[in-house]
Image (spheres, rainbow, N blue to C red):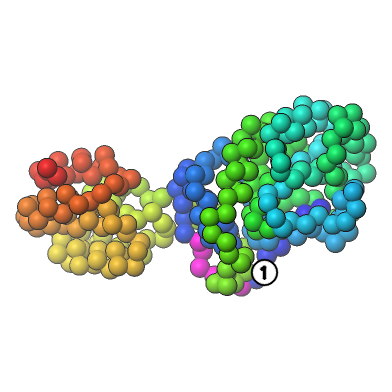
Amino acid sequence: MIVSVSESGSSTEPPSGTGTRRAYDPVTFAIVGGWAPDLGEMVGDGLLKVAPSARLSTGGPLRLAGGPIVLYVGASACQTCSADLQALKRAAGSARVVVLPEDAERDQALRQVLGLYKYDWPVLVGSGAGPVPGTPPASLLVIARDGWLAVRLPASRVAALPDLLALLGRADVVETRPRPSWNGRPVNRATAEASAPAFLPEGLAPGEDLPMPAAFTDALAAFRAGRFADAMRLLEGASADGWLLPPEARFDRAVCLARLGRKEEARRLLLRIGDSRFHDDIDRVMEGLNVRRQ
């Protein structure tokens, strides 16, 4: 009953996240902080729209605006429906819940369970496409941000639902979606959900996003060639455009200074480095260069 709709065009892909600490709204590019993989799989590549023929059993269309909506996709055989729906009732809290039969022509068993337990959740009925492609029965689909974001998880993992609803229901910034800068290109989740670059074997700390900017790759080439002064100059460009965070930028500059024999300058710079996701790697590299922070 729900199809994923995206428009053609080109755009810059959203920045990548770590996959364990944050995720990105595919259209607004807003950070969803506190994300963890066990909360579910982000799906869809644009605005979700309900098929024109789809209606709620209570009357009227399903509107995606407002707070998160939980869709339960019930299997025609309904072997786990009873347990799934009881667990969903406990976990959903005040969230809107809609039931979607796997097959609209074979929903009798699902409706019987709803009636037996006196659940008044509406059923999405009518012909049309299924939910987000690939969503199997006995699944939960949580739709948020007015249909711009959807997360899928098995019904057996309903225990994660309260945390997921709290995360997706948070509105730190009120804004119009999509952002004007989005020109309709579907999100490339292979990029958006990629892990942040690891600490480099050369002993330099990269930024959090891919691809690496030209300023950093040029600096890396100069560093590998032993041209540490050139590398330090080029790294300033990667820092200026915001790709390198301040702790990593200061560390990379300190490494170049140490390689140039200017270890006292490197030590002073490290005193103001702050917290870094490469804390252990930084200590190891600086010990190898015989530079101490203290």
Specify whether residue 10 is in view.
Answer: no
Q: Which residue sits at x=66%, y=44%?
A: 152
Q: Is residue 175 left or right of residue 259?
A: right
Q: Which residue sits at x=57%, y=72%?
A: 180
Q: Nearer the viewer, residue 116 or 227?
A: 116
Q: Quadrant of residue 219?
A: bottom left
Q: Is residue 289 left or right of residue 29?
A: left
* Vertical relation: 235 (above or below) 247: below
Q: Is residue 233 left or right of residue 69?
A: left
Q: Which residues are magenta?
A: 9-14
Specify whether residue 12 is in view.
Answer: yes
- Identify the residue position indicated by label 1 in the image: 7
Secondary structure under tag 1 reads loop
Q: Which residue sits at x=68%, y=46%?
A: 142
Q: Position of residue 125 (x, y in %)?
A: 88, 49
Q: Position of residue 267 (x, y in %)?
A: 12, 50
- Secondary structure of the magenta portion, mostly? loop
* Vertical relation: 206 (above or below) 277: below
Q: What's the amino acid at mark 1?
A: Glu
Q: Quadrant of residue 121?
A: top right
* Vertical relation: 122 (above or below) 269: above
Q: Residues within 10 Å of mark 1 (few under 14, many from 20)?
A: few
Q: Position of residue 225 (x, y in %)?
A: 18, 60
